Structure formats: structure tokens, C-alpha cells
Amino acid sequence: MIHSWLNNFRLHLANNDSLIHFSILGVLAGLSTALVSLAFRFLIEWPPALWLPNNDSEGYESLPVWAHFALPLGGAIVMGLILRKLSKENLRTGVPHVITHLHAHDGHMPMKNAVVQFFGGAFAIITGQSAGREGPAIHLGAAASSLLGQKLQLPNNSIRVLVGCGTAAAIAASFNTPIAGVIIAMEVVMMEYSIAGFTPVILSALTATTVTRAVYGSQATFIVPTAQMASLWELPYIALLGLLVGGCAAMFIIVMKMGISLSERPILHRMALAGLVTGCCALIAPQIMGTGYDSVNDMLSGEVALIAMAAMIATKLIASAFSCGLGMPIGIIGPCLFIGACIGGVMAAMGSSIFPELATGGSFYVMIGMGAMMGAVLNAPLAALMTILELTQNPNIIFPAMLAISIASITNSEIFKQRSAHQTVIQHLKLFLPTDPISLALQRSSVATLMQRNIHMTKNSISNDDAKLLLTKPHQAYVITNDEGPDMRLIYRADLGEKLELALKKNQTDPIPLLDTCTISHSIVKIHIQATLREALYTMNKHGTEAVFVTGYISGSFPDYGIVTRSDIERYNTTPQK
């Protein structure tokens, strides 16, 4: 009963227009991601609260001066000693890892990397590394959803959707911002906007937000006072803010490249170097230790001095970017928001002293700076805009934020010629990701959508009785297993029918060799029923065939098999898709 229902569920998921079934997946992904995100958040908040002053999980600046240096350095060395026992492949974490496995491995994410991300990311934050929790949360949410799909042996096209759902749910659970989660999943990770993909991703973000609010309440991550632009005369100043943020975003990526250039060094050396740099920066500005969200809230309330914010810009940028480049399992979204907040705070303080009659509240510039930095470093302007809108709950910020985010993104990509941080990492790995429109369209559907099931498997040599039986059945094609080897051939009924009848009329008693009887046959290779249409096309190109044989046992049930031809995929690709 369960196997039958599950097989039917898989069959519906093979096509990307089965909205109800994909919606169910979205809810399941949101629930699993919320549970993992809550466990991760508990792990990074509970232990520090036990030993940091005043039981403040972010109170690293209250530690003695020597601890500002020793804690991140010692923690990084311990992490390096542990991680050196793992293979290089298992050390890859974060959003670039999610993007790579989504587009190059059809969303199949390994468990070991997720374990490294969970404990490694938590240990990094606990030991005061200049880190963000959102990157690890995205990895964990995507991995939890992907592993769920793999466990249920769902079609690969649906596992790809699950990864997008996990991404959206992770951001929604981290910031209490469901819309921003959806846009980040589409713009940064999936790199496409599709009607069929929106609904499950939205439901996933909604589910994760509901679970998180049930535990932590509806309070947003940042406490943002209500503010709006005082005058249109501020627009040039906001444009200048965007220009400065774009320059800092470019510097962030350049520093990260410096860390990436050392990626061939032993992991222990890299972690120790990351801890050393962070420790030195923390001696100057201890506020950069951990996520630093308490300092962001201080800036929003105007409690941080101008010189302190300037120091935090330089130290946070160097420590976070260099550590990420060296392979520390931390995220960059949090540090980008922190740096952007500092830049916005500096600009607000300077503006209020130069033009006090035109100055808007400091929190206004702090939030715009956060959005501009996030949009420029991630090359995700819409995601940044939605994040700021949801965090502030203030539609008045949209107009000036659009200007700052656009200018910052243009400055980073066009003036300084820098890619997004995640694409920079992927470029270093020298990976080709099939993200062109045709490849993305073919990845939305499984081979089960197009495969022709009216086929018959048979050996090459068959008896006269079997040949007669073959002719009585209305099969469209025959998959021939070569008696002398593992090779398979495809023969269409139209090519075999008359010739097989002639062979039978000769009244032969010896077995009939089908491949000799019909000289027109086609090479065919196997592919699993979970595969997408892009995988099928890639397999055909790799082996020089015109068709693939789809097969695979699903959960111990009956085997489902068929063939998919190149012409089937070409016709699908020219048909308008949702």
C-alpha cells in the first residue's frame, strides 16, 4: 500500500507541473529545515551563554583583552587538528557547495559535508571567529531537504526543488524573513524564476517561519527604529553611500581571493592563519567576534562612535573575507550585513555633522548600507532589497535602498570587475555549472515524464515460439541484450516486423538472432529512473547514442523501465514549459 502510494507520488513529481505534490515537498522541506536550523541556533547560542560575561551569547567584547586574541586562534587550531583527518571533498561547505551540488549533481548533497558544516560552523562561531550563521544555515537546510529526497528515492528534478526549498526555509528561519528567503533561493542558488518552483519554495519558507516563530516569537533579528528619507536632496548622498559600499564589496572579494590562493596549503595551516588574523583584528575591534548582531543593533540605536565603526569596517572585512577564503566553515551574509551597517553608520554620522538640517536618522543609513553590501557581494540586488524591506517593515525605505543597492552592485561588478563571492569560489574550483536556460529547463523534469514504456526486453537469440509471441504483442520497440556481452541495442518494431516474419516462414528450428535478422539497430545505454532530462541528454552525448534505457527498482517494488530518445527531448525542449 505504502509502496504503491510512494511510486505514484514519484511519478507525479517526475513532471514539474504537479503543483500539489511539489507543494507537499515544500512543507516537508520547511519542517525539516526549521528543525535543523533550530538545533544549529541552539548550539551556537547555548554554550557561549554559559561562560561569556552576563550570560550574553554575543558578549565577546566583554572578555579580557588576551582572550580576544587567544580564543579565535586557539579555536581555529583545534578545528584544524580535527578537520585534517577528513578528505578535501568533505571539507567543502557553505552556499558555493550548495550551488555546485544543485547544478552539477542534481541536488544530491552528501551527509559528511553537512556534518562538518553543522559542528564546524557552530564551533567557529562559539570560539569567536568573525562569522555569519546564514551560510551554514543555508547549507544545512539544503542538505536536510536533499537527504530527505534521496532517502525517498525521489526523481532528481524534485530533489533540485527540495534544495531550493531548504535554502528559502533556512533564510526565513534565520532572519524571520520568508519573502527574502524565497528570493535568495531563486536568485542566488537556483538562478532562475519559474512559476512551478515558486509555490513549493514559498510554502517551505512559510513553514520554517511558523516553526521558528513558535519557538522564538515574531521578533525580527534586528531592532529597527522607524525612519524615512527626509528630503530628495539626500539622494546624491545615498548614491555616494552605494559607491563606497560597492568599493568595500570589491575589497571584500579581493581579500577573499587572497585566502583562496592558499587553498592548497594543509587545512591545519589555513585554520591557524585564519584564527591568527581574526585574533589580531579582534584586538582592535572585539565587536567583530561571533556574528556581531548585538553590535548591529547598537548601531541601529546610534550607540556606536564614528571611530569605532570605522575600525570595525576594516577589521570585519579582513577577518571575515580572509577566513572564508581559507575555508573556514562560516557564512558571509552576516559579515556583509555587519560591514554594510558600519558603512551606513559612518555615513549617517558624517552627514548629520555636515548637513544637520537634511539628515535622516542613523538607523535609516545603517539599513541601506546593510542591503547595499549584501546585494553587491552576493550579486543579488532583489534579494537584498527584500531582506531590508522585511527587516524594517518600512516601505519608505524601498526607494532609496534601490538606488544604493543598484549603485553598489554596478560599482563592484563593472568598475572593479569582481564576481559575486560565491561565483568567485566556484570559479576557483574550475567547475562548469549548466545554468543556461535550456539546461535549466531540462533539469525541471525527470526521464519518467517522457519515457516510452511500451517496449519489450529480450535476448538476441530467441526461439520460433518466442518470435511468434513477439509479433502478437503491440510493442513499440525492443531492447536487445547481447548474448556475448553487456551491450544493449534498440530495435524498433517498424524495422523488425517484416524481417522477423520472413525468418519464421523459412521454418527454421534454430534460434533466431534478432540483431542479424534486423540490420537496423541503435546503441543504447542505461540510466536511472531518477535522472533528469538533462542527465539523459548528457549521457547520450557522452556515449554517442540516440536513446537511453531507463530502469531502476524503486523501494523494492516492481521495476519501471522504458526508453527516452533524443528526438523526445528535442520535442520537449521546443514545447512551452511552465
Image (cartoon, rainbow, N blue to C red):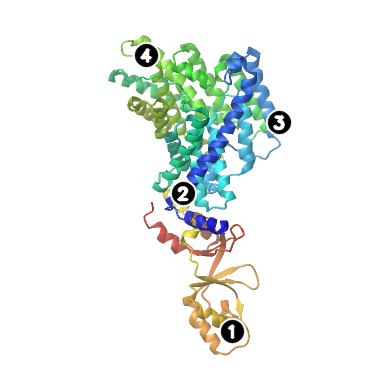
Query: In this rendering, which labeled residue sits more in front, label 2 or label 4?
Result: 2
On the rendered image, what quadrant is the N terminus found in? Answer: bottom right
- Tag 4 near tag 1, CB within 8 Å: no
Q: Amino acid at mark 2?
A: Phe
Disc on the earlier residue, 4 or 1: 4
Compute the Cα span from label 3 to label 1: 70 Å
Q: Secondary structure at mark 3?
A: helix
* Alpha carbon distance from label 3 to label 4: 48 Å
Q: Counting residues from the N terminus, which is met first, the one under dot 3 or under dot 4?
A: 3
Sequence order check: which comes first, mark 3 or mark 2? 2
Q: Amino acid at mark 3?
A: Leu
Q: Which residue is mark 3?
A: 81
- Percent x, y of residue 532: 50, 55
On the question of residue 129 being in view, the answer is: yes
Q: Nearer the viewer, residue 519 or 313?
A: 313
Q: Which mark is residue 22?
A: 2
- Left or right of 146? Residue 186 is left
At label 1, the amino acid type is Asn
Residue for badge 1: 464
Query: Does 557 sit above or below residue 213?
Result: below
Residue 551 in picture, x, y percent from top left? 57, 62
Residue under numbered circle 4: 351
Nearer mark to the viewer, of 3 and 1: 1
